[in-house]
Structures are given as structure tokens and as C-alpha cells.
């Protein structure tokens, strides 16, 4: 796939049989973990009224994005292991070609958007400690926006990409596609920067909030702990997202700029995409560590399951 508009890395052409089998096993393992852990997190949050607070609903929304990575992105990669060409042809092949590349990028933007919304909501909490959380309607609006914005930004891919000569290819001038994708990559950087800046501002403000807030001590301590843990969760999730997705995005950017994909780059893309999927399995654990009511809710779900089995 050198100097070509062909988009798909056909793993069957770059991996040997034994290595291909090993990759499949690793992908299936991570996919299973991601599906189980994210479903458990979503169920734990939505099952009880007291856990359906603003931050937790955004966390559940982020988990839904990670679940889509496991349900959609990983099976697509596994499907490409079986051959060296695009296997679905005709009208259905065109739909699958467009949808795969749209979803493959779109769902990766859902998680950082939810992290940004969580950070902004926590920032409201420390700038005015008496400010109530967003109402149910406002939170549902953010939940919808976390999907509408990525859908709108990645929708041009339905026009840019099509099935031609049994290959999924770019159908617009390469410069248009390159500039479009670079703008999307820049958006990720802007999101990272804003989340980090707001997160640091919140943590610094929490250090002096005792002086400016007149609340009962127990309530003040509990409020500070919740705010601090939420931001620590956001920053850890963001750090994990950057660590595991930036190499993949960097390789994707390299292929777009150079318009070439060597066998080595193909193998690296396979490896880096695996880490993207691994990140979707790690996020529920990060939430479990930092958010106390989610921790209790997960334990309740697990204990209920054990009682039912008994």
C-alpha cells in the first residue's frame, strides 16, 4: 500500500499465520475485558437513583464510547486478519466501508469530550461552591452533545471514502483529506490542553477553598474530596488516553502526510490500535479507584449477581 489512496491495512498480508493467531487471541482477550468491565460500570451507574448524578452519567456515557470501541473497532480488525482484500462488495460493501472508517474515528472523540464536560462541571463547583449541579436536562444535553459533535465532525468521511476496485479508498483530492484529518488531530490536542489546564486550576483552588467557603467542616471535607477525586480520575483517564492513543494517531498522521504504508508501519499500526482498545478496558478501573459511589455501586451489582447464582 505505497503511495496509494487505499485506506485499509490488510493484516493477512503483513502477518504470518502464527503471529496472526497470537494477535487475534490478544484482541479477543481485550475485547472481552472491555465489554464486561464497561457494561458493569454502566449497569452500576444506571441501576440506582443515587448513582445517577451528573458526573456519573457522563462517566457512563464515556464507558458507552469505550464499549463501542470493543464492539465495533476490534471485530473489524479481527475481520481483516482473514484476508488481504476488502471482502464485502456491492452496495453493502460501500456502506460497510464508509461506516467502518467513520465509526473508527468518531468513537475515539467521545471519551475526551466527556472528560472535558466533567472537568467543566467540576470547575463550576469550585468557582462557586454553593452552585448546584446541572439539572437532569442539562446533563442529558451534554450526553447527547458528546455524540453529536463527533458525528458532525467525522460525517465528511461518508463523502471522502468509498469502495473502488475492491478497495476502500479516498475519493477526494488527497490534500483535502490530509488537511481535514490534520484539523481533527489538532482538535484532540486542544481538548487535551483545555482539560489539563482546567484540571490543574481546580486542584490548585481546592488547596485554598477552606479559606473562602463557609460550610460545616464535615460537608466541606466531603465536597473537597469528591471534587478532588473526580479531577484526579479525569487527569488519570486523560493520561491513559494520551499514552495509549497518541502513538496510533501519530502513525495515522504519518501515513496521511507521507501517503505510504510500509509493512513495518502496518505492523506498528496493528500494535498501536491494540493499545487503543486496551485503554477502553482500563478506563472502568480508573473510575472504580477514584469515584467512591461508583465503587459501592459496582460491589452491589457483583454481590447481587452472586446472590442470584446462589
Image (spheres, rainbow, N blue to C red):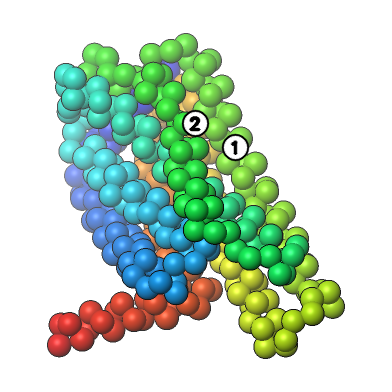
Q: Residue at x 52, y 49 (%)?
A: 142
Q: Residue at x 40, y 68 (%)?
A: 45
Residue 233: which numbered mark, if any?
none
Density class for disc 2 (Cα within 10 Å; few <14, some 14-19, many ≥20) is some
> For the residues marked 2 and 1, what is the alpha-carbon distance in whole angstroms?
10 Å
Q: In the rendered image, is residue 37 in sight?
A: no
Residue 187: which numbered mark, if any?
1
Q: In the rendered image, is residue 10 in sight?
A: yes
Residue 92, image x and y in percent? Answer: 18, 25
Which of the pair 229/222 is nearer the observer?
A: 222
Q: Is residue 207 left or right of residue 122?
A: right
Find residue 203 and report its image quarter.
bottom right
Which of the pair 18/296 is nearer the observer?
A: 296
Residue 30, image x and y in percent? Answer: 31, 58
Tell me the SS state at disc 2: helix
Residue 153: which numbered mark, if any?
2
Q: Residue furthest top?
A: 173
In this rendering, the answer to whether 178 lies above or below 103 is above
Q: Quarter holding the N terminus?
A: top left
Compare marks 2 and 1 and give the one earlier in the sequence.
Answer: 2
Residue 68, image x and y in percent? Answer: 33, 49
Amino acid at each position: 500500500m505505497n503511495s496509494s489512496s487505499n485506506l485499509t491495512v490488510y493484516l493477512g498480508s503483513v502477518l504470518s499465520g502464527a503471529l496472526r493467531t497470537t494477535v487475534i487471541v490478544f484482541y479477543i482477550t481485550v475485547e472481552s475485558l472491555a465489554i464486561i468491565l464497561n457494561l458493569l460500570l454502566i449497569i452500576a451507574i444506571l441501576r440506582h437513583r443515587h448513582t445517577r448524578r451528573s458526573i456519573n452519567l457522563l462517566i457512563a456515557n464515556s464507558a458507552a464510547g469505550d464499549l463501542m470501541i470493543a464492539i465495533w473497532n476490534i471485530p473489524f480488525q479481527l475481520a481483516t486478519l482473514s484476508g488481504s482484500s476488502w471482502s464485502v462488495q456491492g452496495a453493502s460493501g460501500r456502506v460497510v466501508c464508509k461506516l467502518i472508517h467513520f465509526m473508527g474515528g468518531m468513537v475515539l472523540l467521545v471519551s475526551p469530550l466527556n472528560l472535558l464536560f466533567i472537568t467543566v462541571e467540576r470547575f463550576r463547583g469550585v468557582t462557586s461552591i454553593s452552585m448546584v449541579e446541572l439539572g437532569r436536562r442539562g446533563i442529558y444535553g451534554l450526553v447527547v452533545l458528546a455524540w453529536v459533535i463527533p458525528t458532525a465532525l467525522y460525517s465528511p468521511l461518508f463523502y471522502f471514502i468509498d469502495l473502488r476496485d475492491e478497495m476502500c479508498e479516498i475519493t477526494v483530492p488527497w490534500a483535502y483529506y490530509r488537511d481535514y484529518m490534520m484539523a481533527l488531530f489538532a482538535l484532540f490536542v486542544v481538548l487535551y490542553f483545555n482539560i489539563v489546564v482546567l484540571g490543574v486550576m481546580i486542584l490548585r483552588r481546592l488547596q485554598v477553598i477552606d479559606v473562602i467557603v463557609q460550610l460545616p467542616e464535615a460537608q466541606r471535607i466531603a465536597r473537597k474530596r469528591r471534587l478532588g477525586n473526580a479531577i484526579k480520575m479525569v487527569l488519570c483517564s486523560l493520561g491513559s488516553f494520551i499514552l495509549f492513543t497518541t502513538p496510533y494517531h501519530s502513525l495515522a498522521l504519518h501515513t496521511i502526510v507521507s501517503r505510504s504504508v510500509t509493512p513495518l508501519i502496518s505492523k506498528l499500526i496493528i500494535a498501536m490500535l491494540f493499545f487503543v482498545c486496551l485503554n477502553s478496558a482500563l478506563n472502568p478501573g480508573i473510575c472504580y479507584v477514584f469515584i467512591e459511589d461508583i465503587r459501592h455501586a459496582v460491589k452491589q451489582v457483583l454481590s447481587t449477581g452472586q446472590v442470584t447464582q446462589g
